[in-house]
C-alpha cells in the first residue's frame, strides 16, 4: 500500500461523505464527530454500497440493506445481517462474518491522505 492524496479536509467536512477510488480500491471517506474515517465502500456481506448507511453515535456504520453494523475505527463486526428477520439467519450464513476494511489516514497541510 502507498499513501495517496484524497481530498481537502474542508471538502469532506462540508459533504460529510465522499466516495473515491484509489489503487483499484473503492473507498468511502466519512467525517464523523470531528474525525476522518476511510472504509471500504461496500459491505463485506454481499458487496452492497455503504454510501447511504447510517452512521451512529457509537461510531459505527449500518449497512442500509441487511443492517450489518461495523465499527468505523476498527472495522470489527458489531452485528451481522440481522435483517430481514424472517430470513436473516439464512442470509447471515450465505456469507460468513467478515470485518470492514479500514484504511489508515493522515492529514498534511489540510489535505487528507489515505494508505491504499
Image (spheres, rainbow, N blue to C red):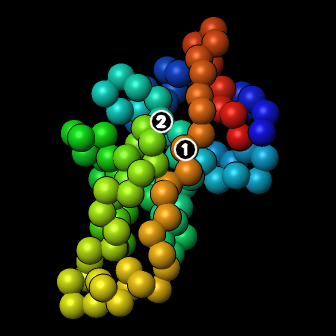
Q: Give the image quarter of residue 14.
A: top left
> x%, y% of residue 6?
66, 31
> x%, y% of residue 78?
31, 56
Instruction: Specify few, some or many for label 2: CA neighbours under 10 Å numbering under 14, 14-19, or 20 or more.
Output: many
Residue at image coords 45%, 69%: 97
Is 25 situated above or below 14?
below
Residue at image coords 38%, 80%: 92
Decide if residue 49 is in sight here.
Answer: no
Q: Is residue 80 left or right of residue 50?
A: left
Residue at image coords 56%, 51%: 101
Q: Is residue 23 left or right of residue 47?
A: right
Instruction: Name the N-terminal-most of marks 1 and 2.
Output: 2
SS class of the residue under badge 2?
Answer: strand
Please name the residue that numbered disc 2 is placed on: 37
Of circles 1 and 2, the one toward us is 1
- Taking depth in this image into account, of 18 and 38 the one nearest to the observer is 38
Give me the C-alpha separation between circle 1 and circle 2: 8 Å
Decide if residue 3 is in sight here.
Answer: yes
Do labels 1 and 2 touch, CB within 8 Å?
yes
Amino acid at each position: 500500500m502507498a499513501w495517496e492524496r484524497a481530498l481537502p479536509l474542508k471538502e469532506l467536512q462540508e459533504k460529510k461523505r465522499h466516495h473515491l477510488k484509489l489503487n483499484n480500491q473503492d473507498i468511502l471517506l466519512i467525517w464523523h464527530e470531528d474525525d476522518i474515517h476511510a472504509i471500504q465502500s461496500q459491505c463485506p456481506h454481499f458487496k452492497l454500497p455503504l454510501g447511504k448507511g447510517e452512521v451512529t453515535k457509537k461510531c459505527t456504520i449500518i449497512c442500509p440493506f441487511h443492517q450489518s453494523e461495523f465499527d468505523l475505527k476498527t472495522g470489527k463486526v458489531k452485528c451481522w445481517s440481522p435483517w430481514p428477520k424472517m430470513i436473516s439467519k439464512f442470509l447471515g450464513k450465505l456469507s460468513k462474518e467478515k470485518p470492514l476494511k479500514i484504511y489508515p489516514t493522515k492529514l498534511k497541510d489540510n489535505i487528507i491522505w489515505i494508505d491504499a
